Image: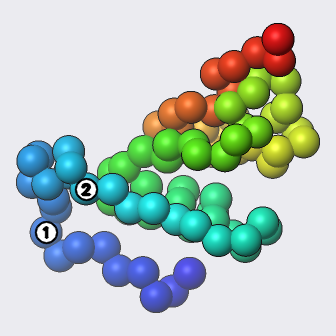
């Protein structure tokens, strides 16, 4: 991913509180890696919108981020629901 450039100046608090970057694309298109790199560079979070990754017991089946990636930047709404 060589085309991305971080902003020249950090976002102000009110800008960062209201700015949302959405990464979309086909399965296995590199969205997770891109989101991780963007979140690291911009000081952001990764907020899950995958309908299956919200389930705790489906980590392997849904290619949910591993523990190492989940520590690199804050992740939200991954594995928050049980299968019941």
Q: Is the C terminus in the top left, top right, bottom left or bottom right quadrant?
A: top right
Quadrant hosting residue 25: bottom right
Which callout, 2 or 1, points at the residue further toward the start of the chain? 1
Q: Disc 2 on helix, strand or loop? A: loop
Number of marks in the rendered image: 2
Q: Is the N terminus in the top left, top right, bottom left or bottom right quadrant?
A: bottom right
Q: Is residue 58 above or below residue 16?
A: above
Would residue 47 appear left or right of 27 to someone viewing this image? Answer: left
Q: Which mark, by number, is residue 19?
A: 2
Instruction: Identify the residue shown where x is 56% and y is 31%.
Output: 77
Residue lying at the far bottom in this picture: please name it: 3
Residue lying at the far right in this picture: please name it: 61
Instruction: Identify the residue shown where x is 33% and y is 56%.
Output: 20
Q: Disc 1 on helix, strand or loop? A: loop
Residue 54 position, x and y percent, is: 68, 32
Q: Is residue 28 above or below residue 76?
A: below
The answer to whether any part of residue 9 appears in the image is: yes
Q: Which residue is mark 1?
A: 9
CA–CA distance between discs 2 and 1? 15 Å
């Amino acid at each position: 991913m060589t085309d991305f450039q971080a902003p020249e100046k950090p976002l102000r608090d009110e800008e960062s509180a209201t700015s949302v970057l959405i990464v979309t694309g086909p399965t296995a298109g590199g969205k997770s890696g891109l989101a991780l790199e963007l979140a690291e560079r911009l000081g952001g979070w990764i907020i899950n919108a995958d309908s299956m990754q919200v389930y705790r017991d489906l980590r392997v089946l849904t290619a949910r981020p591993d523990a190492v990636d989940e520590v690199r930047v804050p992740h939200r709404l991954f594995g928050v629901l049980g299968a019941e």
